[in-house]
Amino acid sequence: MKEADRREEFELLTRLKSGDEAAFRLFFTKHSGQVYRVAYHYLGYREESLEITQEVFMKLWVNRHKLMPELPLIPYLIKIAKNIILNKAKRKLLERAYLQNLEFQPYDKAESLENQLHFTEVKTLVEEQVNQFPNKRKEIFILSRNQGLSNREIAIKLHVSERTVENQINKALKVLKEKLRILGYMLCLF
């Protein structure tokens, strides 16, 4: 990398680290194609590669305070992409192993139907209770439990502190556990 290019990247990284959105957009424009190509090389699917690219840059933004401007950015971005791809592959393997294990479990149709009815009943109770939460708590809980966002990602998305997110999730879980306990369900909600 030329010295002038390295100096420019250093300045942009310094701005990005301090939360400069324009610097972030410049990095995205400059490096997203390269991250996409790496993801596509490993995955071979356009949509998944685009998702990985977006996730890489979301992680870059969320973790911008950890950036070291003196180091080049692209190896860091590629490492993030590879880690995301590897984690998704591991998750798929675990899911496949779990499903294969289920195939070999003795199957009791009556017990399965009863379990499904209990699950549906509990799910309905939880959804009804969540709908009664104050709007912000409901939104935070849904982003956390239904969409799988981290507390940090929710905090950024909703422009609140991570502590607020944690408090709202804890309050929601406390209410849900108590409601289900009163109704005779002994569940662990995570």
Image (cartoon, helix red, strand yellow):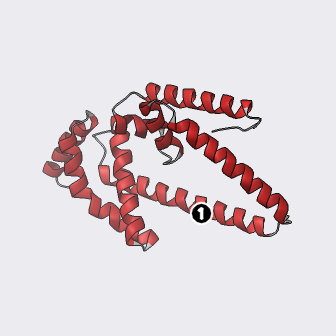
The one nearer the camera, 106 or 61, is 106
Figure check: 17 above or below 47: above
Percent x, y for residue 44?
43, 74
Residue displayed at 45% across by 59% down: 82
Q: Check the image and name the residue furthest to the left.
A: 4
Residue displayed at 67% across by 51% down: 120
How packed is label 1: few (under 14 Cα within 10 Å), some, or many (20 or more)? few
Residue 10 in view of the camera? no
The one nearer the camera, 143 or 86, is 143
Image quarter for residue 152? Answer: top left
Quadrant of the snapshot with the N terminus: bottom left
Percent x, y for residue 95?
65, 62
Residue displayed at 35% across by 39% down: 157
Residue for badge 1: 92
Percent x, y for residue 94?
66, 60
Count of marks placed on residues? 1
Image quarter for residue 129? Answer: top right
Relative placement, left or right, of 117 versus 93 is right
Quadrant of the snapshot with the C terminus: top right
Residue 103 in view of the camera? yes
The one nearer the camera, 184 or 7, is 184
Relative placement, left or right, of 31 versus 102 is left
Percent x, y for residue 108?
85, 64
Relative placement, left or right, of 67 versus 96 is left
Q: Secondary structure at mark 1?
A: helix
Name the residue type under label 1: Lys
